[in-house]
């Protein structure tokens, strides 16, 4: 083990002597104090609520019935508009590019 590593371990293992830990008596006295003033300060500094339309960030999707020409699995699939058919993957066999539209469900 290198000397630098030994020094670091020694520093980390030394406990500072000037830290005062609270006693159980202090904890019991302060545990159930009225914290309304603290809550009021937190509420006053909080960010005001906003209404956000979550559909703004979601791209348009296209549903259609597709059939895999590799395993003949047929299912209704949904994918983002603009996605090329050759990049879609069959959910049954896992092959990419073998899905074709049946013409139903458009």
Image: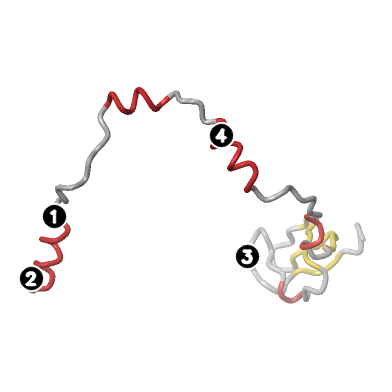
Q: Position of residue 14 (x, y in %)?
A: 12, 54
Q: Position of residue 28 (x, y in %)?
A: 34, 23
Callout in the foreground (4, 3): 4
Regarding mark 3 in the picture, which secondary structure is present there?
A: loop
Residue at 74 percent across and 65 percent down: it is: 68
Q: Residues within 10 Å of mark 2 (few under 14, many from 20)?
A: few
Check contact, mark 2 vs mark 4: CB within 8 A: no
Callout in the foreground (4, 1): 4
Check contact, mark 2 vs mark 1: CB within 8 A: no
Point out which mark residue 1 bears.
2
Q: CA distance from mark 4 to mark 3?
A: 59 Å
Q: Indicate the quadrant where residue 69 lies.
A: bottom right
Q: CA distance from mark 4 to mark 1?
A: 40 Å
The answer to which of marks 4 and 1 sits earlier in the sequence is 1
The answer to which of marks 4 and 3 sits earlier in the sequence is 4
Callout in the foreground (3, 1): 1
Q: Can you identify the residue that label 3 sits on?
A: 94
Quarter in which the N terminus is drawn: bottom left
Q: Can you identify the residue that label 1 sits on?
A: 13
Q: CA distance from mark 2 to mark 3?
A: 51 Å
């Amino acid at each position: 083990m290198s000397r630098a590593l030994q020094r670091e371990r020694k520093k980390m293992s030394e406990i500072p002597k000037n830290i005062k830990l609270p006693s159980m008596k202090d904890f019991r006295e302060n545990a159930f104090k009225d914290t309304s003033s603290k809550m009021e300060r937190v509420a006053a500094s909080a960010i005001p609520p906003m209404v956000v339309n979550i559909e703004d960030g979601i791209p348009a999707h296209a549903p259609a019935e597709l059939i895999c020409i590799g395993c003949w699995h047929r299912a209704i699939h949904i994918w983002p508009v603009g996605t090329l058919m050759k990049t879609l993957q069959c959910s049954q066999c896992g092959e990419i590019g073998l899905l074709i539209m049946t013409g139903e469900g458009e």
